[in-house]
Image: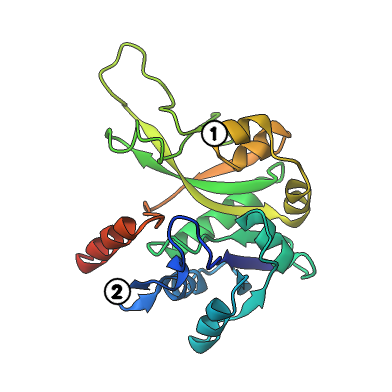
Amino acid sequence: MVLGVIPARYGSTRFPGKVLAAVAGRAMVERVWTQAKCAKRLTRLLVATEDRRVAEAVKAFGGEAVMTDPGCASGSDRVWQAAKDLPAAIIVNIQSDEPLLAPEMVDRMVEALKASPEADLATLAFRMEDSRGYENPNVVKVVTDPRGFALYFSRSPIPFYRGGKGPKLWYKHLGLYAYRKEALRRFVNLAPSVLEQAEGLEQLRALENGFKIRVAESPADTVAVDTPEDLKRVEEILSHA
């Protein structure tokens, strides 16, 4: 079974209640659910939340919600808590703040993990050929080896083009993950790592502990909603779609 889990914490620090914020007339978590539900590679889809308001909203639009501990340290911990007792070979962490998610993104990530037996998890990156976001620390970059396995993730500009006037080509990391179940179990039981704490990037914990991360190229970019301003940007994009 390939299980999709949308961790949907109501108590967001920067934007409380954002998972229920309206995006073009629908709650953000509903829009993410609807898109993820169209993915061909998912067997089952859940929303994992700590708040009854979110669970009730999910039930109202026909989704399946499970309650998790309000004290979960991260989305990955929330996903594991929802999935650990279910017979899933692959567990997909689908962020609840990605209303521009395309179903093909989920499928491509799952397919990449299945095609790479040595990989512990897979994630996505979008090919960028201009300077937008390259120097923005809120945009995470990733570099890979020739086989598509992650070498490093950073908020800094990577790769650095020595002597150049700007980026020639770089990859924006998109925060979705497909884990083999045992890999997710191992991951959530590891302490935060040095590089993870330095960059504020959870995936570096996996790299520092020897996990193999397969990076698949995404067919589309996304806009993560962290602030009300991000929400306005998403609505503008949807209005022109």
Give amino acid for label 1.
Answer: Glu
**202 over 29 or under it: above or below:** above
Seen in the image, is 137 located left or right of residue 184?
Answer: left
Amino acid type, callout 2: Ala
- From what the image shows, is residue 2 above or below residue 212? below
Residue found at x 50% / y 60%: 12
| Kind of element beneath mark 2 | loop
Question: The N terminus lies in which quarter of the figure?
Answer: bottom right
Residue named by callout 2? 24
Left or right of 186 on screen, residue 3: left
Q: Is residue 107 visible?
A: yes
Q: Earlier in the sequence, mark 2 or mark 1?
A: 2
Q: Residues within 10 Å of mark 1 (few under 14, many from 20)?
A: some
In the image, is 184 to the left or to the right of 104?
right
**Residue 52 - label:** none
From the top left corner, tell me how far across and down residue 128 is, in percent. Answer: 34, 38
Q: Is residue 5 left or right of residue 1?
A: left
Picture residue at 19% right of the left edge, 65% below the top: 240
The reply to whether discs 2 and 1 touch (Cβ–Cβ < 8 Å) is: no
Tell which residue pokes out farthest to the left in this image.
240
Residue wearing tag 1:
199
Which class describes the residues within 10 Å of circle 2: few (<14), some (14-19), or many (20+)? some
Helix, strand or loop status at disc 1: helix
Nearer to me, 167 or 157: 157
